[in-house]
Amino acid sequence: MDYNHKKIEQRWQQYWKDNKVYHTEINHDKPKFYVLDMFPYPSGAGLHVGHPLGYIASDIFARYKRLNGFNVLHPMGYDAYGLPAEQYAIQTGQHPEKTTNENIARYRSQLDRIGFCYDWDREIRTCDPEYYHWTQWAFIEMFNHYFDVKEQKAKPIALLEAYFAENGSEGHTAAESKPLKFTAEEWKAMDDKQRSDVLMNYRIAYLGNTMVNWCPKLGTVLANDEVSEGVSIRGGYPVEQKLMYQWCLRVSAYAPRLLDGLDSLDWSDSIKETQRNWIGRSEGAEMQFKVADSDVEMTIFTTRADTVFGVTFMVLAPESKYVDMVTTPDRRQAVADYREEIKHKTERERIADKKVSGVFTGAYAINPLTGKHIPIWVSDYVLAGYGTGVIMAVPAHDSRDYAFARKFDLPVIPLIEGADVSEESFDAKEGKMINSASDKLDLNGLEVKEAIAKTKEFIEKEGLGRVKVNYRLRDAIFSRQRYWGEPFPVYYKDGVPTMLPLEKLPLQLPEIDKYLPTESGEPPLGRADNWQTEDGYPLELNTMPGFAGSSAYYLRYMDPRNHEELVSKEANDYWEQVDLYVGGTEHATGHLIYSRFWNKFLYDLGKVCKDEPYRKLVNQGMIQGRSNFVYRIKDTNTFVSAGLRKEYDTTPIHVDVNIVSNDRLDMEAFRKWRPEYADAEFILENGEYVCGWAVEKMSKSMFNVVNPDDIVERYGADTLRLYEMFLGPVEQSKPWDTNGIDGVNRFIKKLWNLFYKGDKWLVTDEKPSREALKSIHTLIKKVTGDIETFSYNTSVSAFMICVNELSKLDCHSKEVLTPLVVLLAPFAPHVAEELWHALAADGKEDSETAVSTVCDAPWPKWNEEYLKEDTVNMPVSFNGKTRFTLSVAPETTREDIEKLALASPEAAKWIEGKTIRKIIVVPNKIINIVVG
RNA sequence: GGCCGAAUGGUGGAAUGGUAGACACGAAGGACUUAAAAUCCUUUGGCCAUUGCGGCUGUGUGGGUUCGAGUCCCACUUCGGCUACCA
């Protein structure tokens, strides 16, 4: 019986399914372990070989934990809402649900072939009403809560209402969009609409007029993490800034907790750092600047309070509310023109053209420390969304202020001794202060750090401002003008946004005829018939963004069919949180922030028992594609081989990697590939057409996609799994290269040959030799250690070494082969299962019932006794250079090793005529003799 | 501009401060075979010697710490990733 991967893999996949081997239930007799993959968005392209990398790594860990006696939760599902399905629907008129379901079916069949140990009974889909019921529920809870800054906790909005009735706004501690002032009497006098508007200022899920990233091409707003360099991440369309009335989540209120929580997490430093930067805590001060000849007082934020003596002008963001308040009548037109110009620039254009632009408002502010009048300007280099949207400009010590001052010829006052500001600003926070004294405050001679502290103290004491911690993290914009997303459980009762009662959930997504906005510009839901409550109130037309459904999905897996609540207390108390989360770094500032926020909110409500959702996070690297190119000579259908392309004017064209082998093009296949290449001519080198290559993202458009199905078909799932792990460290990005896969496949065959020779069963009950025992125990120790640190590539190597050794020793002893099979089970589960059953049935065919699954076997333990060496070879070095090795018994003392080394005949040669200065002996490691 | 990470043979990659290059691919040579595939054996960082069993050199560059550095420290170069008028 030869190794037949198709037969084996089919057989055991069926067995696992029939026997529900991977079904998981709460079991209080066992410790739990929760292993989770970031669930995929099922795209139309299907899985390529890069996708399973993380899934294989987590599958190995899940199986390993199970073999070690843990009750392992390892579920899978689909992030099913998303733009591509909707874009496809717009183009083809197909319902996104239909294409999504087709894509899911394809994903599932691809996943099944790789042999994962998922409990599919717990599958979830974000577009399933049973699931988004709880997304809508969480939204209602967020609407009904505010964030108490003092207690750092979400609390019911009713408490805040009671507070307002008692005290008005004075002294409240709720996180707010903007400061509001009203008395208890004023509050009581408000009608429903007015109260609703006021409460929106505090709710965690609120409607707000905010600057949003508007993408005209996609017809929707996008969150900050969905935009990069002024274009949408999906599609790469330009994004502009627009003021819109949108649902938002007060994520910013949780910024301190999101930041502090990072310390307790077992995540990589780099991803924690990325989140820290995204949250962007900065300590500084807020200061008031009075506007001359006016009552207006502007608040600025600065981290460089020490530079206040160098402020020579102020700058407002074009969108700042202060612009209208301060602009003098004669400057109105100029300012209006400038703002108009900025508005029509997209974010991308703003970034692209680095030209300094701005306009003078005609107004002057008064420097609170020097009393000097300084001009107030407007410029787009100041962002409305950060700090207060107003800055005090210190051109000598900020490069942007410097560029602005030079352009508009504003004064530059250096504040640090020795700083040369004739060519550029001096931005470093170091040096001694100069030019910084008034009758009230003298900073001269202080170090920058001391000056910052002293200034802060001074302005607090004098009431000029206050110490303030600012965060870059913005509230999440939660409305999307799309169809394929969760509907909001919201209706408008006489214009007042109102939540549906919980018993009306889930509010199901309605059917519509077309997936475009309405003629009047409303979102697609405006096309739905009868999209209103029973009482005839209109329902919200926006839908929720992609991150809504993925923010709490890990909780739902704990209790996926619960109709009463998101997750039962029992299930949550048992499974607690994700112990190991595996996924890509691209979610660092999106999903992983929102999910932590969402979890912390539910924690505040007492719905979940852990403050953080994901205890340990492993980021698998991306598998890149290796693309091939052909070079077409311009305006011809002639292609020139890569080595000769410099002699012609050519255009590189991607060519399907499946018709290229070892960078040599199959020219016949190329002619058949596309009709336009049917009569292609080639200029060859040495009779071959050599393609160029590059490492790029694996994608259809680059023609470099390798489908795991093809690998499974040819080599088997076990080979695919082992090979993906063997490619290199899980966390590292690397290009896919099928070249080495034969080595892994050979290993499995060699392993198989330890058990079978043809049809003959080779396994015996003989006592294994000491070498064989040493080999297997070395492997047990190595693999056990490697799995804990995700060093799967070296584990696979260790398997190869062990199997090679056992082959050479001609060892077929059950005592050795049994632990070998169990060790292999996480990596190559199909062949391990086959051999496990064969071992139990002594190689007979009807082995299925002989023993239970290998998944429940006990993980082998190594015995140090077998690892001991009879003698240890120690390298002997002279002045750090190794000259020979010395065999000593393992327990030899330092002194004896030293004596043996000096007495050995080889040593004499190196010592001769020199004096020994020093001898370093590290037992079992090295002997270094310093001579001179 | 800021932050993070990386740099080791023809290639992917191994090396708790202790014999650098494990393991695998590729390549070369050989065995078996009519032949091929498959399998097995040998060699494989570079240079020199290979009728002497060896020598020299070597982990991006330059310095440092150490008996000893791919590994630790400082500076630099290059390449990746993330992020960005964040005051």
Image (cartoon, coloured by chain):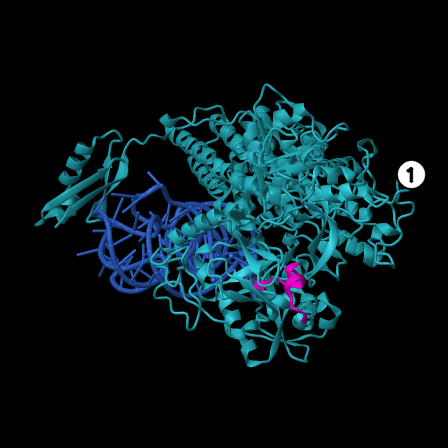
Does residue A769 sit above or below A308 in this rendering? above
In screen coordinates, is A684 left or right of A191? left
Find chain B in the image and tell me its colour. Answer: blue
Q: Amino acid at mark 1?
A: Asp
User: Which chain is mark 1 on?
Assistant: A
Q: How many marks?
A: 1
Q: Between A456 and A487, which is closer to the camera in this rendering?
A: A456
Q: Position of residue A871 (x, y in %)?
A: 27, 33
Q: Position of residue A22 (x, y in %)?
A: 66, 30
Q: Position of residue A587 (x, y in %)?
A: 60, 48
Q: Which residues fall within the magenta stretch?
A: A315-329
Q: Between A237 and A753, which is closer to the camera in this rendering?
A: A237
Does residue B60 sit above or below A171 in this rendering? below
Does residue A326 sit above or below A107 in this rendering? below
Classify mark 1: helix, strand or loop.
Answer: loop
Find chain A in the image and tell me its colour. Answer: cyan
User: Is the residue marked by circle 1 packed among few (<14), some (14-19), or many (20+) residues within 10 Å?
Assistant: few
Q: Between A645 and A272, which is closer to the camera in this rendering?
A: A272
Q: Quadrant of the N terminus of chain A?
A: top right
Instruction: Specify whether residue A467 is in view.
Output: yes
> Would you name the residue on which mark 1 appears?
A535
For the point 16% across and 46% down, the residue is A930
Residue A184: in magenta span: no
In screen coordinates, is A887 left or right of A614? left
Q: Position of residue A838 (x, y in %)?
A: 59, 28
For the point 50% across and 72% down, the residue is A410
